[in-house]
């Protein structure tokens, strides 16, 4: 039914819904009678989401993503990255999709390690060298959200969130070029691409942030 693998919570909710539907035993003679738990006779998406998600507190990283001074495509990419919804090779493997004769390993480092979000952007030796060019060292433990939050809180630069997202975006583009254009992973090529993307983003940023970002090129 679902193309993307369900999370444990989503699978549990799906099973509960299936059990409730099977317990209804509807007949063809009965007519549907719609009623809503929030007490109104009219359905609206806003009422549904307010009722369902009002008690859920999202991780602050999502507010940081949407508030950062980057292009929308980078924000959307970052949302997919944090939610583990990028088409990394482990996702393709979980979907039983063949990939280069079954090679699901990271193409950037070439160490024979399965490519997933954490490895690609954090643990990969090539990625670590890229982050080091920006004076960024990832924490060893924690989920991706926790590590990004730790980076942001420990980095005094006002544009730290922008650097993290643009750095991840440029790594994703470099990875895709290595796969689909048969490029060889190169720190020099990645750095040139990163600076080009960073320069484009500076047009959206405040003057003080723009000057600090452009100083990375020196």
Image (cartoon, rainbow, N blue to C red):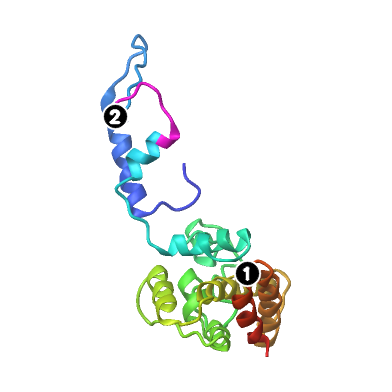
User: In terms of image quadrants, where is residue 170?
Assistant: bottom right
Q: Residue at x 36, y 40 (%)?
A: 50
Name the disc covering residue 50, or none: none
Magenta span: chief secondary structure: loop
Seen in the picture, residue 24 relative to 47 is either above or below; the reply is above
Across and down, in percent, residue 37 comes to 29, 29
Name the disc covering residue 205, or none: 1
Look at the numbered disc 1 and give the secondary structure of its residue: loop
Q: Residue at x 33, y 35 (%)?
A: 18
How far apart marks 1 and 2 lie (CA) works out to: 45 Å
Q: Nearer the viewer, residue 38 or 112?
A: 38
Is residue 40 a member of the stretch shown in magenta? yes
Residue tagged 2:
37
Per the rendered image, the range of residues in magenta is 38-46
User: In terms of image quadrants, where is residue 23?
Assistant: top left
Seen in the picture, residue 207 relative to 218 is either above or below; the reply is above
Across and down, in percent, residue 15 comes to 31, 41
Asked if one can make out residue 172 in the rendered structure from this viewpoint, the answer is: yes
Q: Residue at x 46, y 82 (%)?
A: 156
């Amino acid at each position: 039914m679902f193309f993307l693998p369900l999370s444990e919570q989503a699978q549990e909710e799906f099973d509960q819904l299936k059990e409730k539907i099977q317990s209804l035993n509807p007949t063809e003679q009965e007519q549907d009678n719609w009623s809503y738990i929030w007490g109104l006779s009219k359905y609206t998406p806003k009422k549904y989401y307010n009722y369902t998600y009002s008690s859920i507190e999202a991780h602050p990283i999502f507010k940081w993503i949407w508030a950062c001074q980057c292009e929308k495509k980078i924000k959307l990419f970052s949302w997919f990255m944090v939610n583990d919804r990028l088409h990394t090779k482990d996702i393709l493997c979980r979907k039983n999709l063949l990939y280069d004769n079954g090679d699901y390993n990271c193409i950037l480092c070439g160490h024979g390690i399965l490519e997933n979000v954490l490895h690609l952007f954090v643990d990969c030796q090539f990625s670590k060298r890229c982050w080091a060019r920006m004076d960024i060292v990832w924490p060893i433990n924690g989920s991706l959200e926790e590590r990004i939050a730790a980076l942001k809180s420990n980095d005094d630069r006002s544009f730290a969130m922008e650097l993290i997202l643009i750095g991840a975006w440029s790594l994703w583009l470099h990875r895709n070029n290595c796969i689909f254009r048969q490029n060889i992973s190169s720190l020099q090529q990645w750095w040139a691409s990163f600076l080009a993307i960073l320069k484009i983003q500076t047009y959206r940023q405040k003057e003080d942030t723009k000057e600090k970002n452009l100083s990375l090129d020196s």
